[in-house]
Amino acid sequence: MQEEFHLISPLHLAILIAIPLLSAGLASAARRYPTSAGHIRVTLAVLLIADGLTWHLYRYYIQGVRFPEILPLELCDASFWLSAVALLTLEEHTFHLAYYWGIAGSGMAILTPYLHAPLRTFQSVQFFFGHSLLIVGVLYLIWSRQARPRDRSWQFAFWTLNVYGLLVAAVDYMAGTNFMYLRQKPGSSSLFGLLGPWPWYIVGADLVGLVIFRVMQIPFSSLERAKSSSTDPA
């Protein structure tokens, strides 16, 4: 009998709780033992890379997905690789993209998962492992104070996303693919269904992304203002 996944089930709640707990535990270890910070970063990056390669090999050899559909152009694919690079290099702009694209995308995927296979299958396990690992990696960098979103970084992430979307749209047009659902909405119920027909749902999704990115920046802007106020002479 195939087991189905249910929102806010004990398993779902366990995953949602485990992600910040693991992130906080790793960040605490890095702050307590500074020499371990780099080792943790590299380990998380290697796990992300291994997960990404395994998933694409599975798609090619098991699912029979071929070129051009096999290209890693979905936003979640880009976020995975950006997160791995950010963990390895701590490059600021790469981290910004990993934070906004990755946390927004994988966070939504974990909160409202849409599984294409039964729960006890490699495809579903990989879904939760990959998205959770991405979030853990980015939160680890922030909570261990190795990286943080800078002021106006949300604008950079938003405009870069639009440029990336244009490039993916060109691939979709030439190859007949539907990466990022730029040519057609997904068949399943999703946020796209509330945003109207093509191409208006793309505009709506872009505006939703703009709001989400801005909200994701607010805690760090508030922290910067608080620090500035505390350092101002009385």
Image (tube, rainbow, N blue to C red):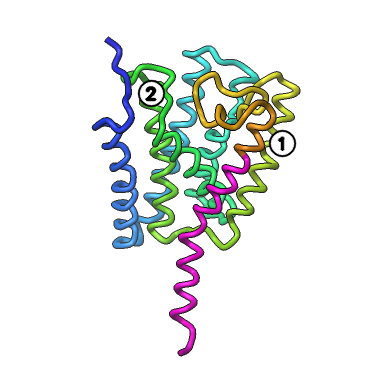
Q: Where is residue 46 in the image (x, y as percent from the top left)?
A: 43, 40
Q: Quadrant of the N terminus?
A: top left
The overriding secondary structure of the stretch rendered in magenta is helix
Q: Do the residues labelled 1 and 2 touch (CB within 8 Å)?
A: no
Secondary structure beneath disc 1? helix
Element on which disc 2 rests: helix
Observer-nearest of 174 and 4: 4
Residue depicted at 56% across the width and 48% down the height: 211
Mark 1 residue type = Leu
Asked where in the image residue 209 lies, by quadrant, the reply is top right
Residue that mark 1 sits on:
166
The residue carrying mark 2 is 124
Q: Compared with residue 227, is residue 101 higher up or lower down, i.e. above or below?
A: above
Residue range in magenta is 206-234
The vertical placement of 173 against 64, above or below, is below
Counting from the top left corner in percent of width and height, residue 74 is at 58, 31
Which quadrant of the view contains residue 119? top left
Circle count = 2
Question: Which residue is most to the left?
Answer: 10
- The amino acid beneath tag 2 is Ser
